[in-house]
Image: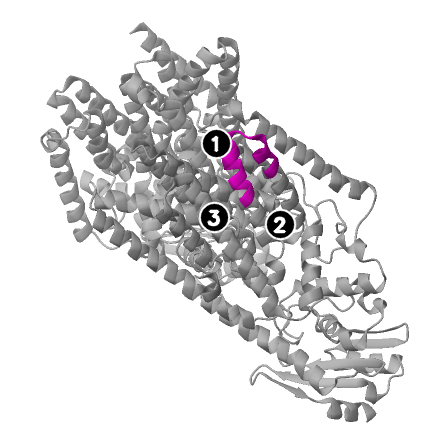
């Protein structure tokens, strides 16, 4: 089922951060210090995911530019996670049908699609989730059989998952609370679990602090890593779970459309030219809407919880509680996000991957409770109603996923065609080369005059990585993420090679004059957003330079 | 009985102490329009119908407010002091009625007294007492609303229909002061069902008095709506939003009313600013100040929404055990929980731009404050009882005392701060009027006041004197009530002559002329057009720095002679 749903994503292409990662691998490999790459990046709240990086490195080594193979790995992991979820729910409830519904909802859930469709976004996260699901199994076994080795496995899974991606950091709080749910709030028996978590926490923090104090880091992150005021964090501890709860059930587009409507009927003062100010409607108004949603979800879960308890369905009640706690606590991992992204109201889709486990469980049970009450022991009615609503939900997610994947495929094909077009025409580059591209449009919120190709990272750096297998550029070309900035354009010479990329003709001419380059060093292409064509204009640009 | 008398005196003493500086203030804004309107009705109509009927079909129908306003106007005129004292006395009486209602619901003297204190000291609602333009309607409505509730609770205890009639009649009287009490029509049946343990078989029979009163009231309103003229002024102010907006407001506005009536508005706005500061730094300006439009709209809505959720959960947890242990306490809790949001539901129908405001007008919080005062004291009593058994008397006593002290002192401090500001503004305004009148106590038959200022106030772009309504109309009323009689045409309610804060105009009718200007060029052209001599002009100049009014009549007349 996983492969069927995501079948079209095999045609996608690298989106964004993969180019940075590949550039860094090349750099550290060329300077003979590949180990450095596995150190944390600079800053106390920076990423440190050495196992995740090893994973990526292996993929790069074996798959190179084969995006389809990376997608394959992602899909395998997602499918594995779904199976683990199925077996966990079955282990807990002994209800095969429920476990099946939960895992199907998890597989089809379109909300966290980025974790699967974007290999760099999902890399590490998918595998960390596998370890998280394994830790749940072992924790449940520990709660039931009391054997110490299960607790050890749980702690170990948590420890290793943190080095795959820090998204599982919430489990320091999550594991003791899940254990309490498994053990029906027996606080006394929770002490060994708490102790295990404290030990893992101390070891993990010590490792991180060791790198900080030893000033060992791989590179300065290009993303904004500034830490906000200390008062921001308590506020985020309240707001982020509320955002997460609503976003676990409603897609980004639905929330933004709702926020737009809310602006129209509640805050007309922010409407100009017939449209709400997007800076307001997509942030603070969207938040208000999400807070309404979150309180409604919490209210529904409370009512369902007590209703299930009343009907002696204690296991299902426990599952409801587990799902809400999981959604709420999984958001806490993102409270520490540094820089501007930490203030975003809409969480990136991949952040919702773990919480989508909770939302799948929640939806399955709430639907059951709803139809159970509506049907009043009419089994046929319950089964038919439940199935119909479930199929509707699954269809919505399925079609939404297909639409997203289709968009990614068409963008990916276009980007790949840029690289292929240049590489096919110019298999071997001059020792000193500048690649110039012109465009007729600004993309991704750039200022209107900044025309560029529709790519999300610097096209110059993409070319460097793409050509490296045949050109074998010196390490200096990958130093300090040269040309990685999305609108970056520059020319540089080092170790006998010269490489540059420009979008602006004026800057191109300045670089040619400054570096005494001949027209033969220039390769030019032109992109038309209207016809989606990418033409070779090398001859005409060389002619223009000569004049 | 003795303890009730003691409570009565304590409440009065506390309120008179809190509002002790209030009589030192002065009329603020709409009072001048009301005075003008009273003069108009007095000169135009000799019968009571002319006074009590609304001047438009769709505006408020508040006959008792109109009658009492007229009585106060005839008795005291421009004498502020007795009017202020009456306002404080009525607020004290209302607080005592809150005490009686709480006592009837809970049968606990201390909790009832605490409820009365919370009501008396609520900073958000002091406008109902300190703004004389609205106090008669707001306080009068609250008095009879409370009486209606009291009789209703007595009815539930004694089951004698006379009390239901008294309740219904009090309700009608409260509606005659202001329509805000309309919600009782929904609240009382709901509370009836709760109190009667879901036995509502006799509901229709028992509510017959209310039914009859309602039919009478509704028929009267319908008759007036179809027979009176359309509303004056801009129709935008009466425009109703779409159905979606109304539904949204009907859910959200009552919901957030809990916190809005509980916490001082300044505290809510402060928290709203912090929210922008720490969660939405993109809305800070270069000086790190949050965008004020967001602070007073979406942001404060988020703050109120989250605090309301927290408040309801906390109160519910504190009281839920009473569902079984003490049903009357739990019923009182349900009564308050229903009363607060229902008391503001009608505000969702506020038309025009005002309907989109996130914060409810302070004077309209006077009604939910009744329910909140009882709920809050009930909540504190529950916490006190719970802590007493677990943590110990001393600790619980200290915590509760600190909480009460905080709530009361923050509110009392806020009221006194606001009154202090009013006192300083009022003395300035009173001095200006007295100064003008003392210098020119007799006016020519045709007179124009020319009073420019060097400062702009209240966010206006033009420079005016520190008055919140048009100085021309204020002077007109001030002189009229001081003996300089002007004909009725100057006070026509539908034309609002010189009432707008920036207005400047000259008008002649029935042999008299009156005008007010701040612009010299406009003054000149009016003098030319109406062939008036410079002798008709009385001129002053306002210097904000020294808070000084300088008489420039002679100099201006000389200049006018030259320029004409």
Q: Which mark is residue A144?
A: 1
Disc 2: which chain?
A: A
| Residue labelled with disc 3 | A85
Residue at figure coordinates x 69%, y 85% from the top left: A424
Residue position marked by numbered label 2 in the rendering:
A342
- Residue B67 in sight here: yes
> Does B16 sit left or right of B271 as displayed?
left
Ranked by sequence position, the earlier of labels 2 and 1 is 1
Distance between the alpha carbons at the discs numbered 1 and 3? 18 Å
Q: Position of residue B205 (x, y in %)?
A: 9, 31
What is the secondary structure assignment of the residue under circle 1? helix
Left or right side of B78 for A378: left
Percent of width and height locating residue B92: 37, 21
Tell me if A382 is positioned left or right of A25 in this view.
left
Q: Residue A299: image x %, image y %?
A: 38, 39
Earlier-in-chain disc, 2 versus 3: 3
Q: CA distance from mark 2 to mark 3?
A: 30 Å
């Amino acid at each position: 089922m996983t492969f069927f749903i995501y079948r079209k994503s095999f045609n996608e292409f690298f989106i964004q951060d993969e180019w940075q990662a590949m550039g860094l691998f090349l750099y550290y490999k060329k300077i003979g210090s590949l180990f450095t790459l596995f150190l944390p990046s600079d800053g106390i709240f920076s990423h440190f995911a050495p196992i995740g990086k090893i994973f990526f490195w292996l993929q790069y080594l074996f798959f190179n530019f084969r995006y389809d193979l990376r997608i394959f790995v992602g899909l395998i992991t997602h499918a594995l996670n779904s199976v683990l979820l199925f077996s966990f729910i079955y282990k807990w409830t002994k209800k095969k049908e429920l476990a099946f519904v939960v895992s199907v909802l998890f597989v089809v859930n379109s909300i966290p699609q980025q974790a699967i469709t974007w290999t760099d976004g999902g890399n590490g996260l998918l595998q960390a989730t596998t370890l998280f699901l394994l830790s749940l199994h072992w924790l449940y076994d520990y709660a039931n059989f009391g054997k110490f080795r299960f607790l050890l496995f749980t702690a170990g899974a948590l420890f290793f998952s943190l080095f795959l991606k820090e998204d599982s950091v919430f489990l320091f709080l999550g594991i003791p609370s899940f254990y309490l749910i498994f053990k029906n709030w027996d606080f006394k028996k929770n002490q060994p679990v708490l102790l295990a978590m404290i030990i893992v926490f101390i070891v993990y923090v010590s490792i991180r602090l060791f790198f900080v104090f030893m000033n060992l880091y791989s590179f300065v992150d290009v993303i904004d890593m500034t830490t906000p005021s200390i008062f921001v964090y308590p506020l985020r501890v309240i707001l982020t779970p509320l955002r997460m709860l609503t976003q676990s059930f409603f897609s980004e587009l639905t929330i933004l459309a709702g926020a737009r409507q809310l602006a129209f009927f509640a805050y007309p003062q922010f409407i100009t030219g017939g449209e709400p100010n997007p800076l307001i409607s997509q942030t603070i108004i969207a938040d208000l809407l999400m807070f309404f949603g979150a309180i409604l979800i919490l209210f529904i879960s409370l009512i369902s919880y007590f209703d299930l308890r009343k009907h002696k369905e204690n296991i299902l009640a426990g599952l409801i509680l587990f799902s809400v706690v999981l959604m709420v606590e999984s958001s806490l991992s993102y409270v520490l996000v540094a820089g501007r992204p930490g203030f975003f109201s809409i969480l990136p889709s991949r952040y919702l991957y773990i919480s989508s486990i909770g939302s799948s469980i929640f939806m399955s049970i709430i639907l059951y409770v709803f139809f159970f009450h509506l049907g009043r022991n009419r089994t046929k009615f319950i089964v038919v109603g439940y199935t119909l609503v479930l199929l509707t939900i699954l269809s919505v997610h399925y079609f939404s996923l297909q639409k997203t994947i289709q968009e990614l495929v068409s963008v990916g094909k276009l980007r790949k065609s840029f690289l292929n077009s240049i590489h096919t025409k110019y298999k071997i580059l001059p020792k000193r080369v500048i690649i110039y591209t012109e465009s007729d449009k600004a993309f991704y919120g750039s200022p209107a005059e900044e025309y560029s190709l529709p790519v999300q990272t610097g096209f110059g750096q993409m070319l460097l990585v793409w050509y490296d297998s045949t050109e074998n550029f010196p390490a200096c070309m990958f130093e300090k993420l040269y040309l990685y900035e999305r609108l970056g354009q520059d020319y540089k010479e080092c170790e006998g090679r010269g490489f540059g990329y420009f979008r602006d003709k004026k800057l191109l001419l300045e670089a040619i004059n400054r570096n005494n380059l001949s027209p033969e060093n220039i390769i030019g292409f032109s992109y038309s957003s209207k016809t989606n064509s990418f033409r070779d204009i090398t001859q005409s640009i060389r002619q223009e330079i000569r004049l | 009985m003795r303890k009730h008398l003691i409570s009565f005196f304590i409440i009065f003493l506390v309120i008179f102490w809190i509002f002790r500086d209030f009589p030192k203030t002065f009329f603020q804004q709409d009072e001048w329009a009301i005075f003008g309107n009273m003069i108009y009705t007095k000169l135009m109509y000799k019968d009571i119908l002319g006074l009590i009927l609304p001047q438009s079909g769709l505006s408020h129908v508040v006959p008792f407010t109109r009658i009492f306003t007229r009585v106060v106007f005839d008795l005291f005129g421009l004498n502020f002091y007795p009017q202020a004292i009456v306002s404080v006395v009525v607020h004290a009486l209302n607080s005592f009625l809150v005490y009686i209602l709480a006592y009837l619901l809970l049968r606990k003297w201390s909790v009832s007294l605490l409820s009365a204190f919370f009501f008396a000291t609520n900073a958000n609602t002091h406008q109902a007492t300190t703004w004389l333009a609205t106090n008669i309607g707001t306080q009068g409505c609250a008095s009879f609303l409370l009486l209606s509730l009291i009789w209703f609770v007595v009815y539930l205890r004694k089951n004698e229909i006379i009390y239901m009639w008294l309740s219904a009649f009090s309700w009608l009287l409260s509606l005659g002061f202001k329509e805000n009490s309309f919600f009782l029509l929904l609240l009382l049946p709901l509370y009836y069902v709760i109190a009667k343990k879901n036995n509502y078989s006799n509901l229709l029979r028992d509510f017959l008095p209310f039914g009859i009163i309602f039919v009478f009231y509704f028929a009267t309103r319908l008759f007036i709506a179809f027979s009176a003229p359309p509303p004056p002024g801009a129709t935008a102010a009466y425009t109703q939003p779409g159905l979606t907006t109304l539904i949204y407001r009907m859910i959200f506005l009552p919901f957030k009313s809990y916190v809005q009536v509980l916490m001082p508005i300044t505290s809510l706005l402060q928290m709203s600013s912090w929210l922008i500061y720490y969660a939405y730094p993109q809305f800070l300006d270069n000086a790190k100040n949050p965008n004020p439009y967001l602070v007073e709209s979406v942001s404060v809505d988020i703050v109120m929404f989250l605090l309301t959720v927290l408040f309801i959960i906390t109160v519910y947890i504190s009281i839920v055990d009473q569902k079984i242990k003490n049903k009357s306490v739990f019923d009182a809790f349900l009564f308050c929980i229903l009363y607060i949001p229902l008391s503001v539901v009608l505000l969702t129908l506020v038309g025009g731009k005002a309907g989109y405001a996130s914060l409810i007008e302070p004077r309209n919080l006077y009604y939910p404050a009744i329910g909140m005062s009882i709920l809050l004291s009930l909540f504190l009593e529950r916490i006190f009882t719970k802590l007493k058994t677990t943590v110990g008397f001393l600790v619980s006593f200290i915590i509760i005392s600190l909480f009460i002290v905080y709530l009361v002192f923050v509110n009392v401090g806020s009221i006194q701060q606001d009154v202090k500001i009013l006192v300083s503004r009022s003395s300035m305004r009173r001095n200006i009027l007295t100064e003008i009148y003392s210098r020119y106590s007799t006016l020519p038959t045709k007179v124009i006041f020319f009073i420019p200022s060097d400062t702009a106030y209240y966010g206006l772009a033009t420079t005016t004197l520190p008055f919140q309504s048009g100085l021309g109309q204020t002077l007109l009323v001030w002189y009229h009530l001081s003996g300089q009689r002007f004909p009725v045409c100057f006070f026509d309610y539908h034309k609002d002559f010189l009432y707008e804060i920036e207005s400047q105009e000259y008008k002649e009718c029935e042999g008299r002329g009156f005008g007010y200007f701040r612009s010299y060029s406009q003054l000149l052209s009016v003098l030319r057009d109406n062939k008036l001599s410079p002798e008709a002009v009385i001129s002053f100049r306002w210097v904000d720095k020294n808070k000084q009014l300088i008489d420039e009549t002679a100099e201006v007349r000389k200049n006018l002679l030259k320029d004409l």
